[in-house]
Amino acid sequence: MHLTLHVWRQASPDQPGRLVEYAAPDISPDMSFLEMLDVVNERLIQRGEEPVAFDHDCREGICGSCGLMINGSAHGPMKLTTACQLHMRSFKDGDAIWIEPWRAKAFPVVKDLVVDRSAFDRIIQAGGYISAATGTPQDANALPIPKPDADWAMDNAACIGCGACVAACPNASASLFTAAKVTHLGALPQGQPERERRALAMVAQMDEEGFGGCTLHGECQEACPKGISIDAIMQLNRDYIRASATKVEVAEWTGAA
């Protein structure tokens, strides 16, 4: 395959960026998208040029590092697929491909295609945990949980924090990410003691990070490589409204009071 790449290049956060065109000949359709970028970078290095910086780690669709906008779509044209799982056979010989970083105020560009997603870490730190001592792993039947509840929790626990939901959302909202983290804990008995305070604390941190508000546009659900449903946002809203109505104090939970 012979491709033409238009890649976002930006030397540092305080420098302007621009799209740079690169020819990518002799690309195997069996390569993953990141393997294709590896080949392009090897050729750039051989020519004495700066390679393209991009995030990656497991390359198995698990870690969520490989966030890229590919032809305007988060992770590319295939649904339920991360960029590292996307193969070049998804494109045609002679195609032009535009490759950009996530675009969101809360995800500032570090270099080229790399963005700072530490805002997600701070949302988790605000309440994405339980305080109950769980001890050693229990037998599966030791704590009876209805299967629909267990399935709902696992569906939301599948979130890998890649940020595709934010990148795809016209408001750059992190509501689907936050909702998945709140909901998978709130669906289980162990997550009940902090359930309402968790919703308040994590939503407050999400707003503080500068993410946009959710208007239920639905692009987050379409872009999510793990297929997390927008229904999680409905659950987050219910938990948040219930906590607000009962005047639960976040400070009381965090020890700030």
Image (spheres, rainbow, N blue to C red):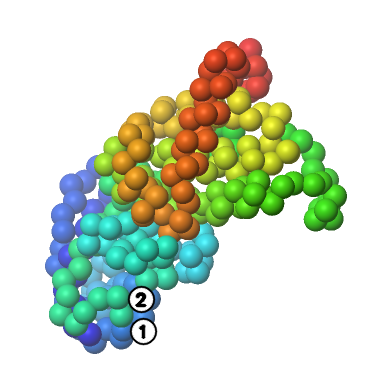
Label annotation for residue 64? none
Asked if the residues shown at circle 1 and circle 2 are in contact, with their CB atoms under 8 angstroms apart, the answer is yes
Q: Helix, strand or loop at disc 2?
A: loop
The residue indicated by pointer 2 is 87
Q: Quadrant of residue 55?
A: bottom left
Horizontal relation, residue 247 to residue 110: left or right: right
Vertical arrangement, residue 157 with respect to residue 212, above or below: below
Residue at horizontal 34 percent and vertical 45 percent from the top: 218
- Mark 2: few/some/many CA within 10 Å (<14, 14-19, 20+): many
Q: At which x and y percent is residue 184?
A: 60, 44
Q: Nearer the viewer, residue 193 or 210?
A: 193
Residue at horizontal 48 percent and vertical 65 percent from the top: 61
Residue at horizontal 63 percent and vertical 52 percent from the top: 151
Vertical arrangement, residue 80 with respect to residue 173, above or below: below
- Mark 1: few/some/many CA within 10 Å (<14, 14-19, 20+): few
Vertical arrangement, residue 140 with respect to residue 197, above or below: below
Q: Quadrant of the C terminus?
A: top right
Q: Nearer the viewer, residue 208 or 230?
A: 230
Q: Quadrant of residue 35?
A: bottom left
Residue at horizontal 21 percent and vertical 79 percent from the top: 92
User: Is residue 254 something one can see in this rendering?
Assistant: yes
Q: Quadrant of the N terminus?
A: bottom left
The mark that comes first in sequence, 1 or 2, is 1
Q: Nearer the viewer, residue 235 or 56?
A: 235
Label annotation for residue 30? 1
Q: Helix, strand or loop at disc 1?
A: loop
Q: At which x and y percent is residue 56?
A: 43, 63
Which residue type carries mark 1? Asp
Q: At which x and y percent is residue 14?
A: 25, 42
Which residue type carries mark 2? His
User: Is residue 118 something one can see in this rendering?
Assistant: no
Query: CA–CA distance between discs 1 and 2?
Result: 6 Å
